[in-house]
Amino acid sequence: MRKRVVGKVISDKMNKTRVVVSERIVKHPLYGKYLKRRTKYYVHDEKNESKVNDEVLIEETRPISKLKRWRLVKIFKKQ
């Protein structure tokens, strides 16, 4: 089973590539405070469908380029 992540498109300036950010909340191991952590993914979007601020589902795939290891599966919310 491949990993799947829900995130938000923050850049659509490249051709067939999107930058998607995923936020998660983690608890600090010692102090117990909840912290936001962000991860940026470079995602392959073959048809250039998604735009900035779209909420998307991405899936892990084989390496497509130096940075791209994810592909677009579905667009949840269009902006």
Image: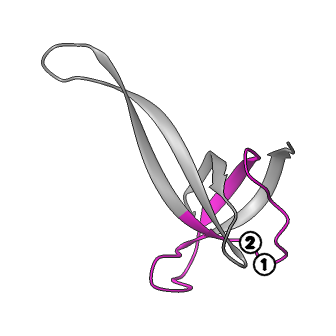
Q: Residue at x 46, y 34 (%)?
A: 24
Q: Residue at x 85, y 42 (%)?
A: 79
Mark linked to residue 45:
2
The residue that mark 1 highlights is: 46
Q: Position of residue 68 (x, y in %)?
A: 53, 76
Count of labels in the image? 2
Q: Is residue 45 magenta?
A: yes
In this view, the residue in front, 73 or 44, is: 44
Locate residue 4: give its quadrant: bottom right
Residue that extends furthest to the front in the rendered view of this protein: 13
Q: Position of residue 44 (x, y in %)?
A: 66, 74
Q: Residue at x 23, y 23 (%)?
A: 28
Magenta region's main secondary structure? loop
In this rendering, would 15 be left or right of 1?
right
Residue that extends furthest to the bottom in the rendered view of this protein: 65
Q: Which range is magenta?
A: 42-70
Q: CA distance from mark 2 to mark 1?
A: 4 Å
Tag 2–tag 1 contact (CB < 8 Å): yes
Mark 1: which amino acid?
Glu
Mark 2: which amino acid?
Asp
Residue that extends furthest to the left in the rendered view of this protein: 30
Circle 2 — which element? loop
Q: Residues within 10 Å of mark 1 (few under 14, many from 20)?
A: few
